[in-house]
């Protein structure tokens, strides 16, 4: 858990704790479901309690659990893409871009590109050339 206190952000902590976060979300949704069922039966409407117990509660819980799962998977996919891109850069012989290493966009490219040509081929009525 030392990655939580890495203020340079040299490593990603999300892949290590995403399982714990998903378990906590699942437990929280189960508690929410039980609270919904208890509140529905406490209203003294038996049909509302049964409806929440069998239809509304499970539907809400499954929807929120699916949304949480999709969000966490999207976050993990982004982080894995960043890790794999860094690995590819290192395998290609480069170093990961950072504040201390300024690199050209591709090998052999000039660091300061030449100025762009004028927008029109004529300058004040005279042809360029």
Image (cartoon, rainbow, N blue to C red):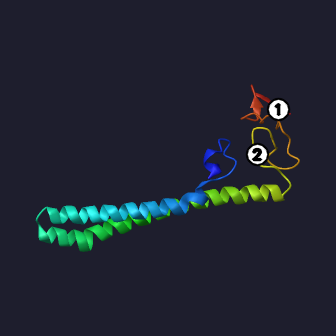
Residue 26 x %, y %: 42, 64
Q: Is residue 71 visible?
A: no
Marker disc for residue 45: none
In which quadrant of the rendered image does the C terminus lie?
top right
Q: Is residue 12 left or right of residue 38?
A: right
Q: CA distance from mark 2 to mark 1?
A: 40 Å
The residue shown at (64%, 53%) is 12
Closer to us: 128 or 81: 81
Tag 2 and tag 1, C-beta contact below 8 Å: no
Mark earlier in primary sequence (2, 1): 2
Closer to us: 60 or 15: 15
Q: Disc 2 marks which residue? A: 97
Q: Please, is residue 60 above or below residue 3 in the view? A: below
Residue 49 x %, y %: 18, 69
Residue 57 x %, y %: 28, 67
Q: Disc 1 marks which residue? A: 128
Q: Please, is residue 80 above or below residue 124 in the view? A: below
């Amino acid at each position: 858990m030392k990655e939580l206190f890495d203020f340079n952000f040299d490593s990603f902590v999300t892949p290590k704790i995403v399982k714990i976060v998903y378990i906590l979300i699942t437990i929280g949704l189960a508690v929410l479901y039980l609270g919904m069922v208890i509140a529905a039966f406490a209203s003294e409407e038996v049909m509302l309690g049964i409806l929440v117990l069998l239809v509304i509660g499970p539907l809400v819980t499954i929807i929120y659990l699916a949304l949480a799962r999709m969000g966490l998977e999207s976050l993990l996919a982004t982080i894995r893409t960043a890790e794999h891109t860094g690995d590819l850069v290192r395998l290609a012989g480069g170093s990961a871009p950072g504040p201390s290493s300024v690199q050209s966009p591709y090998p052999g490219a000039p660091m300061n590109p030449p100025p762009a040509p004028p927008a029109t081929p004529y300058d004040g009525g005279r042809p360029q050339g």
